[in-house]
Amino acid sequence: MTAEFSFKLLATDGKARRGEVSMPRGVVRTPAFMPVGTGGTVKAMYMDQVRGVGADIILGNTYHLMLRPGAERVARQGGLHEFARWPHPILTDSGGFQVMSLSKLRKLTEKGVTFRSHIDGAPYEMTPERSIEIQGLLDSDIQMQLDECTALPATSKEIERAMELSLRWAERCKTAFGDQPGKAMFGIVQGGDSAPLRVKSAEALKAMNLKGYAVGGLAVGEPQAVMLEMLDITCPVLPSEKPRYLMGVGTPDDILKSVSRGIDMFDCVMPTRAGRHGLAYTRRGKVNLRNARHADDHRPLDEESDCPAARDYSRAYLHHLVRSQESLGAMLLTWNNLAYYQRLMQDIRAAIGAQAFEARAAEISEGWARGDIPTL
Amino acid sequence: MTAEFSFKLLATDGKARRGEVSMPRGVVRTPAFMPVGTGGTVKAMYMDQVRGVGADIILGNTYHLMLRPGAERVARQGGLHEFARWPHPILTDSGGFQVMSLSKLRKLTEKGVTFRSHIDGAPYEMTPERSIEIQGLLDSDIQMQLDECTALPATSKEIERAMELSLRWAERCKTAFGDQPGKAMFGIVQGGDSAPLRVKSAEALKAMNLKGYAVGGLAVGEPQAVMLEMLDITCPVLPSEKPRYLMGVGTPDDILKSVSRGIDMFDCVMPTRAGRHGLAYTRRGKVNLRNARHADDHRPLDEESDCPAARDYSRAYLHHLVRSQESLGAMLLTWNNLAYYQRLMQDIRAAIGAQAFEARAAEISEGWARGDIPTL
C-alpha cells in the first residue's frame, strides 16, 4: 500500500493489462473483481470470507447507504470500513444509477436530481457536490462522479444530452473532491452505443486528468457485441497509466472479453444474486442446484476448488438447502460464486503476467462450454 | 466417547445434575442445550460455528427430513451426520409433534397416523415402527419414541387416552429399535397437566428400562408454573441413572428452573428463531436490535463475550442489518444466541460441579433482571 493513490502497470499482453491500484488501505491487484456490498454487507457473507476468497476491494452503493442507515450516521460510526468491518479499500458508486432505477418521483435538472426514497418516500436531493460529500462521509477510497446513465436503446440526441451533462457534473465532482492524495475520484465515460459520443466523452474526461476512468452505461440491456464494440472504441482513448473500471459487468465471459480490451476493474451483483437463487458459477459453467439431477449426487460442486463451499458439501445437500429455501444454501452458493470469480481474476492476472492471456482465456471458455460433470 | 451408549452422573447439587451422555460419536456434557437443525441445517449457521460455540449435539426433525429430502435419500447420502456435515451426536424427534402441528388431513388410529405433507400434500403414514425406521435411516444417535402430544388445556380423559396410547407406542418403538448398543431410544413421559397421569406414565416407562427419558407435552401453552410442577412430580419417578430430556424448552429462565428440578437435556427453536427476528439473548436479558436506541450505538452486544457476533460488531451495524432485513443480521444474531445458550449451559455445569448451582442461578437471573446497558 502507498500513502498516495497510484496505479502501476505491471504487465501487458495484447491489450490486456495486469497492474496494481495502491492506496493507504491496501493494494488492489488488477484485473480485479469487486464484490458488491450494497448496504454495508456483501449479502449472506461474513467479511472474513469475502477477504478469504481473495477480494482486495468491495463496492458500496451510495444510494442505498444514504437512505439507510444514512451517510452522516455511517460517518459517526467511523466510516463504512469501520461500520461494516472491512478495513481494506472500498469503492463507492455515485448513487446516480440507483436514483434513476429505484427511486420515485425523480426530477432531473442541471443542478442535480431530486427524488423520493423507494423505502419510505422521504425526499432527497442528489447533486454532484452532495454525491462527493456522501462518498466522503462513507470514507470511500475510490469515489465516482455523479453521472446520468441512459438506458439503451435511446435516441442519439438523448444519449448526447446525458453525456454532456455527465461531463459538466464530472467537472463539478472534481472540484468538490479537491485534493485528497490517498483517495481517488473517477470520471465515467458515457455515450450509450454511439462511437463518436463515447470518444468525445472519453477525450473530455481524459483532459480533466482524473485518477481513474470508469466506463458506464453499458450492460444496461444492449447485446454483448455492442458493449465490446464500445470498449474497443473507448479504451484506446483512455490514458494507459490510469485504471479503467467497467461498471456493473458482468458474466465471467463478459469479464474475459473486457479484460482482453484493456479493462482493469469490474463489479457485478451476479455472483451474489445468483447465489441466492440456487445458481453456482464453476469452471464448467453455471450449475443450477435446483435441478433434480443433483438430488442424489454425493459429489461436491468442484472437488479441485480451494473454497469449502465448492469442495466440502455434496450437491445433494446443496440441492436440498436450495429447494428448502434454507439460508445456508444462499450462504454456501454466494461463497462459492465469489470464490469462483476471484479465482477467475487470479487466473487472468497470472496469464497476463505469463504473456499467455488469449490462450488461457480460450481454455477457460472451453471449460465453460464443456459443461457440468456428467450425471451420476 | 464410548462404544456403548451410556450416562454418567458426575455431580449433583440439590436436584440439579451434572453428567455425561457418551456414545460412539462423542460425549454430550449435561445439562446440555441442543440447537435445532430442523431440516439438516441449523438455520443461518455453518456447522463449524455450531460446534465452535460449544454444542455437543444437535437435534434433527424427523417430520421435516422425511418429507424433504426424504429419509431414504439421507440414508443413501450416508446418514444425516454425513449429509449435513455434523460428525457429532444427533438426537432426532419422532416426527409425531410436527405431524400433529403442521401436517394436513391427519387421521390417528391405534396403528399410527396418516397425514398429508404440508409442503406438497403427498400422503404419508407414520407408525411407531416407521418412526424408528426413519430415525435409523437418518442414523440418529438418540431416537425418540412416537407419542401423541396433547395440546393444553385438554380434558383429563383426553390426556389419559393420549398418554396410554403413547405408552403402547413406546413398547412398539422399543421392539422396533431392538438392540443397538451405541445408540439410544428414549421414552416420552406424557400426561398433560395431570399429576397422577404424569406419575403413571413415568412409572410405566421406567418399567420398560429404556436408555433415557424425555418429558413431553410441556411448553405447549401452559403457564411456566404448571410446567415446573409437572417436573417436580415427574423427575423423582424417573431413574436417576438415566438422562432426562425436557422437549422443546425453552427460555433461559425455563432452563435454569428445569435444571434445578433435575433435567439434563433441552432443545428449543428460540435462540435460532429469535435471531432471525432481530432479538439477541445476552447476560443482561433479551435485546431487541430493531429498537431505535441502537441506531447510533457503537458498542457491541457484549464486549465480554467470546463470540465474535457479540463482541466485534457494533449495535449500530446490527440494527442496520436487522432493519434492512440483511441475511447477515440473522446470521450474526443466531450465532450470538446459540453462543449465549451454550455459555449458559457451561455456566450451569460449572456451578453444579462447584456445588453452587442455586447461588449462581440467582446471579444469572439478576443479570437478566438488570436489563441491557444504559442508552448512550
Image: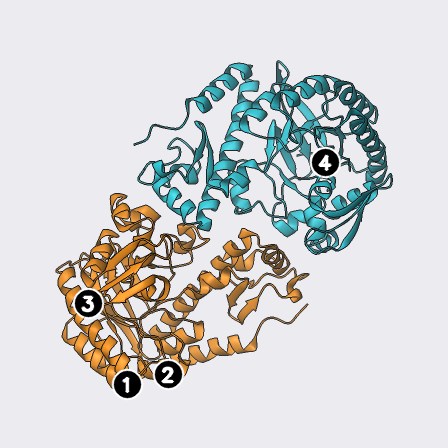
Chain colours: A orange, B cyan
Who's the residue at 41% across and 40% down the image?
B290
The answer to which of marks 3 and 2 sits earlier in the sequence is: 3
The residue pinned by badge 2 equals A226
Q: Work out which quarter of the rendered image holds the N terminus of chain B and state it.
A: top right
Crowdedness near tag 2: few (<14), some (14–19) or many (≥20) residues, C-alpha within 10 Å: some
Relative to B266, is B100 above or below? below
Who's the residue at 43% across and 77% down the image?
A360
| x and y, in percent, of residue A258 in the image | 36, 77
Q: Which numbered dot is residue B3?
A: 4
Who's the residue at 21% across and 68% down the image?
A109
Chain identity of mark 1 = A
SS at mark 1 in the image: helix
Q: Amino acid at mark 2?
A: Val
The answer to whether marks 1 and 2 sit on the same chain is: yes
Q: Is residue B317 visible?
A: yes
The answer to which of marks 1 and 2 sits earlier in the sequence is: 1
**Residues at marks 4 and 3, CA–CA distance in whole angstroms:** 67 Å
SS at mark 2 in the image: helix
Extreme residue in the bottom direction = A196
Dividing the picture into quadrants, the one containing residue B129 is: top right
Task: Give yes or no for contact between labels 3 and 2 (Cβ–Cβ under 8 Å).
Answer: no
| x and y, in percent, of residue B336 in the image | 47, 38
The residue pinned by badge 1 equals A195
Chain identity of mark 2 = A
Q: Amino acid at mark 4?
A: Ala
- Which one is closest to the eye, mark 3 or mark 2? 2
Chain identity of mark 3 = A
Please indicate whether residue A210 sits to the left or right of residue A148 in the image: left
